[in-house]
Amino acid sequence: MAVSTISRILDLVDKHQAKLLTSWVESQVASGTLRSGQIKEDELKEQSQRFLREFTSGFASGHSDDIMGQSWSGVRELLSEFSRSRALQGFTPSETATFIFSLKEPLFALLREESKGNAQRLGEEVWITTKLIDKLGLFTAEIYQQSRDEIIKRQAHELLELSTPVVELWNKILALPLIGTLDSERTQTVMENLLNHIVKSGAEIAIIDITGVPTVDTLVAQHLIKTVSAARLMGADCIISGIRPQIAQTIVHLGLQLDVVSKATMADAFALALKRTGQMVTRASAKPA
Amino acid sequence: MEQIPILKVGRCLLVSIQIDMHDKLALALQDDLTQRLVETRARGVLIDISALDLVDSFIGRMLSNIAAMARVLDAQTVVVGMRPQVAITLVELGLTLTGIQTALDVDRGLALINRLIDAEGDDGAGGAH
């Protein structure tokens, strides 16, 4: 019986494909998929059409219960592609799932029309399709979640890389602009980066700029001291620069001993570093007296 | 028995540690070094640890001791060639080797030690570092 129900639904979908497509796209538009402007109506229509085609061929296999099976692989691939691209474009989870769920309305309307008052038949058909569409919807949400997780992981990695650059300012002088909060993991990365650069460039002075560090508490101070000590063990001196007025106050109130030369700005620190390494920057031509 | 060679370079003694240190060797090194310092009247000690990929609290204390002994015999101590991983480990252990001068490599260490000796000669006061 189930098989005959499926083939009946299939016939209907096949016969009224154009009409189904139009009303499906309409209901997607009505639910606000296009509102954010990230996807064009043509594109939506094309996606819907491709989906309907794969959906019919998946349905034709008769295994409407098992969407992870071989016969539904085309549908799965298509859905993965759509949810992935939607996740990248910044769609919300509900917007992504709406793509599938909005198929229910036009499909049920079609079934109702064709059932001609046969309530039992209608019930069966609606049950089979709703079960199937729910499964596909959940699958879409899962893929969406996976793609978001991948994006977050990648961003976290990029952030870590981005936030710990070591810049060679001048001969024997390195700068280390720190941006963001210093936790143990970042301190470790910063320290390794700095020490490797000291070895590579033979630098004698490293300027640690903390303009971009939002707060300095005892823990951050300890991390800073660790970095400075490690550089000192390698034979390089450190200067801390970019201490904002509030941070200077916090450091004193907390009773922290940084035990290292500190300067208000990177420029001052650079001037001191030049002096310590016995270098000088002069004007190209002497100023007229 | 193993021995750590001590070479005289200019006004300094160069000690290159290339094997794992243990108590006996450390004591022997301290003996040898103080002996040579008195004999040669060297004004500086350069300890090269670039070959060590493991420096624990024991070696840390030994370095501090050597520096203190050299200080008593009017010589400056500079530790050179520490590897980045070693520096990180020492800092994590809380050993910052305070009171010991460091330099990146032997070249810079020699330059630093000569500067320190010259500065001492100028004002005649030791123990400023």
Image: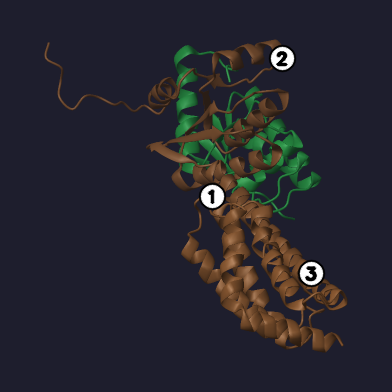
Chain colours: A brown, B green
* Mark 3 or mark 2: whose residue is earlier in sequence: 3
Residue type pointed to by label 3: Thr
Query: Residue at point 61% right, 51% down?
Result: A157
Disc 3: which residue: A130
* Relative to A195, residue A281 above or below: above
Which chain is mark 3 on?
A
Please state which of residues B13 and A217 is positioned toward the viewer in this rendering: A217
Q: CA distance from mark 1 to mark 2?
A: 52 Å
Q: Does residue B10 appear in the picture of this structure?
A: no
Disc 1: which residue: A35
Helix, strand or loop at mark 3:
helix
Q: Is residue A255 left or right of residue A241?
A: right
Which chain is mark 1 on?
A
Q: Does residue A2 appear in the picture of this structure?
A: yes
Q: Quadrant of the N terminus of chain A?
A: bottom right
* Mark 1 or mark 2: whose residue is earlier in sequence: 1
Q: Residues within 10 Å of mark 3 (few under 14, many from 20)?
A: some
Q: Quadrant of the C terminus of chain A?
A: top left
> In the rendered image, which quarter is residue A111 located in?
bottom right
Helix, strand or loop at mark 1:
loop
* Relative to B28, residue A23 above or below: below
Residues indicated by labels 3 and 2 sit on the same polypeptide chain: yes
> In the rendered image, which quarter is residue A18 located in?
bottom right
Disc 2: which residue: A254
* Mark 1 or mark 3: whose residue is earlier in sequence: 1
Residues indicated by labels 1 and 3 sit on the same polypeptide chain: yes
Q: CA distance from mark 3 to mark 2?
A: 63 Å
Q: Residues within 10 Å of mark 2 (few under 14, many from 20)?
A: few
Please state which of residues A68 and A114 is positioned toward the viewer in this rendering: A114
Q: Position of residue B53 (x, y in %)?
A: 67, 52
Farthest residue, direction front: A117
